Each structure stands twice: as structure tokens, then as C-alpha cells.
Amino acid sequence: MRQYLFDGDNEGKPFSRKEFQDVVKAGKYKERLIGFGSLKDFEAEGFYIRNTLFPKLTDEMKVDNAEKIKTRVYKIDGEGLFTRKEHSEEKLADPYYLQDDDAVVIGEHTCRYPFRVKGQVGQSAMSYGALGEKAIQAMSKGLGLAGGTWMNSGEGGLSEHHLAGNPDIMMQIGPDLFGVRKPNGEFSWEEFKKKSEMPQVKAFEIKLAQGAKTRGGHVEGEKVNEEIAKIRLVEVGKTINSPNRFYEFSDVPSLFDWIEELRSVGGKPVGIKIVVGDMDALENMISYMKESEKGPDFITVDGGEGGTGATYQELADTVGLPINSALPVVDEMLRQYGIRDRVKLIASGKLITPDKIAIALAMGADLVNIARGMMISVGCIMAQVCHTNTCPAGVATTDKKLQDGLVVDEKMYRVANYIIHCVKDFTIWQPQPVSTAPRNLNGSTLSIKMNSDVYRR
């Protein structure tokens, strides 16, 4: 009742009604046009994008729109106060891919099989089990249709549902090693090699932490059906609490040695997912990257405002820096040690609209991950019961009955439209990378000096 009747358009957490509608409109109608004026509070703190007097014309932009995408959108026939009539129709869409010479290449000089990405927005880690099979299938097919993007499997292992649309996949490996472990829980090089030989798997991400939970994953036993148990090699119906960290390493040198071995065996890029909090630990890792000439091919920086299917309140509320504080710290520290060109940065944390994506790219990111925006595009209504297996929209549940209303062959187009729309709009804005002006790295992220492309009020 609060969400639909009492909250204002810019109120509500974790996303306001306006932010929620931005995603829905992009996915369903492939547009987010407004009239009369913005609803944003311009007296409040926030980030603002610098404009230019002479922007590029559309036909001057370096984008690849040669191959069109056949999608479906809704057209409104008539709309009253309480009613709306609309119909679905086919539409050809421009993908706004990066041109070949501008593609983001992960592991270009370290791997036998580098990952070449022609779009800068992909799906953040979401496991099968945390989400139901229909939601995963809809995202897989939508991302496969859009192209130039990727799907992160989440730490719950790689399922056939992730492969349904044949998208490029980053396979995440969490502390419990789901999908790449032996029945007794030890890491399995044989299973890892099998996954690395799959053509859809383009890279691996070692999950050290995520923004909403700087700990191992959690899945309620109600969600662990026979299929999920088989994929993860766990017991049916038993609640899963992953360890806080990997048993395979306990410090930066042993982590990097494991990364080197994974890269050697698999031949594909290996990255890490982190939450920024301890500046000394971060600098220790980056200095060792410089000293050892080892390290990950990419670093996913997840802000403390990131989402999850299940975590403890205190972890979600107070642990880890938000993305707009964490991202420039990591970027600048890599630059100060002279190794920024060796690693790609992926940003995540409520970056669900093109303006937020553009700001993240201007503040140092090479790529952007989105999770909850993808969930909204397939029907999530922000009921915030993801951990209970009772999601009324059929997204964060493995209950077959609750998933009946999620039609994969319809929702896949919303995912594709959402990705296309995000990429198109921030590409038109042409965000520029951050400057290399000195920044305070003593732990006080509020004193970071912003560059001229992004202003903070």
C-alpha cells in the first residue's frame, strides 16, 4: 500500500517509484520520454553530468548499427485514468554496439581466449536458485537477443537455464565452489576444465564479496529443489550458508597464484569481485599486482548499496563503501601504481538507468553490471521477499505455481529492450573517462576530488 498509494515518485527504497518506472518503460515500450519537466530535487546532493556546446551528431558517432535486432514493444492505443489499451508489435532496433577497434577486451595479453565485449552493460551475478528458472531463461534469451553483452551466472553454478539464449557468460565461483567442486566440497579441476571448455563461458569471476553481503551466499532450504541440489552438489531441502571466504587462499599472494593457475588451465580471463572498505588492504593488493606482475584480468567493484536474494540487515546497511565512493578510489589507485591498463573495472550497485551508467563510466569504470534492473524488466515488483521463496511475481522463487505468470517468450523482449535502451542513451551522451588529478587515498572517500565530467553538488 505504501509503495503504490502513499510514497511520492522520488520516495521509496531501494528504488523509488520513478526509478522503477524508468526500467519498466524501457523494457516494455523501449522509451522513457517525459513531458513538462523533471521530478528530481535539484536542491539535494547528487551527481550532475557536464554537457558540451557542440555534441556529436548521431551519424558522427562511432557505433556499429549495421545488424538490427528484431524485438517486440508495446504500443499504447488509448489511456484513461484507470485503464490502458495497448498491443504488442515487432520492431527493428539499433544495437549501438561498439566498433571493433573500440571493443573492451578482457585478458587481451594474458589469456589464450580473451573476452571481447562490444557493449558496456551486462547482467550482474544472479544464481539459479536465488531466482527461478523462468526468470533466468528470460534474461538469458533477452541478453542473447540483444548481443554485445554478457550474463553472470552467480555463485550458484552454471545451469541449462543460463544457456537457454546462448549469451556470453561470466561464470562466478563463490566460496562454496558450486559447479566446480567435488561432492565433498573440495575444488575440482576436472569440473572447472569442463566449464572452461564451454564456448558460451567467456570469463570466470572469483567472488570475494558483494555489496549487500561481505560474506558467503545464503539460500533457504525451501529453494533447494532436486535440480538445484544436483547443479550445486548439495543436499535437497537443506539451507545453504557458504563460508565467509575460500579455503583455497588466505592472502593476496595465494589468491594471485590461484588466479594464475585457473587462467593457465582454462585459458580464459579470471577476475575478482570485491567490496571496498579497508584502504590498506586494497593498496596492499594493488601494490602486489605491481610488484609481482600477477593479478586479475578484471575487478568487479560492488557498492555497499548492491542487492541480494538474502543477507543480514546490518551487512546490507553498514558494510562497504557505496559505488560512487569506491569506484574512483580503485581507479585512481591503479593509476598511481601504473597498472590501470592491465585490468578492466566493472562497476555495480543500483546503476539501473543510463545517466547512472554514464556517471560510473566517467568515474573510471570500463563496464557496468546490473542485477535488480534486470529483475524488474522480467516482472519484479520489489516485494522484498526474495529470501522466502514466496515472490508474488515469480522472479525470486523456485515455486512452479508462483512462476506461472512469468512468460519467458514475452519477458525476454523486455530484457533485450532494457539493455538496448541503456546502451543507446549513455552512448549518445559520450561519457569521457575521469581525469588523473590527485585524490586523497587516506580512507576519507568524501574528500575525493571529482573531475570535470561529473560534478557533485
Image (cartoon, rainbow, N blue to C red):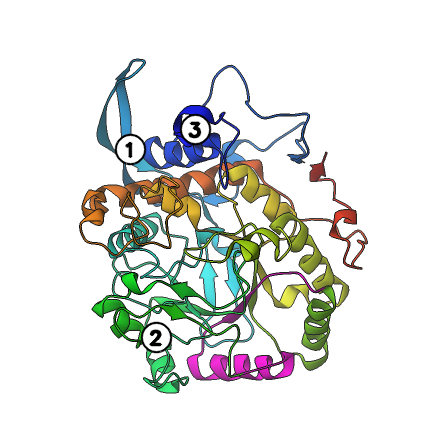
Numbered mark located on residue 271 in the image: none
Numbered mark located on residue 179 in the image: 2
Q: Residues within 10 Å of mark 3 (few under 14, many from 20)?
A: few
Amino acid type, label 1: Val
- Front residue of 447/387: it is 387
x, y percentage for residue 203?
Answer: 44, 69
Q: Residues within 10 Å of mark 1 (few under 14, many from 20)?
A: many
Q: In the rendered view, would you say 162 is above or below 226?
A: above
Label 2 element class:
loop
Label 3 element class:
loop
Amino acid type, label 2: Gly
Task: Answer with mark 2 or mark 1, whichever residue precedes in sequence.
Answer: 1
- Front residue of 284/387: it is 387
Amino acid type, label 3: Arg
Determine the image quadrant of residue 43.
Answer: top right
Residue at label 1?
Answer: 73
Residue at label 3?
Answer: 32
- Front residue of 265/378: it is 378
Q: In the rendered structure, are the residues bearing label 2 and label 1 in contact, judged by CB atoms less than 8 Å apart?
A: no
Cα separation, mark 3 vs mark 1, equals 13 Å
Task: Answer with mark 3 or mark 1, whichever residue precedes in sequence.
Answer: 3
Q: In this view, does 413 lie to the left or right of 175?
A: left
Q: Does the magenta stretch include residue 188?
A: no
Cα separation, mark 3 vs mark 2, equals 39 Å
Q: Residue at x 32, y 55 (%)?
A: 131
Indicate which label's residue lies in the foreground, 2 or 1.
Answer: 2
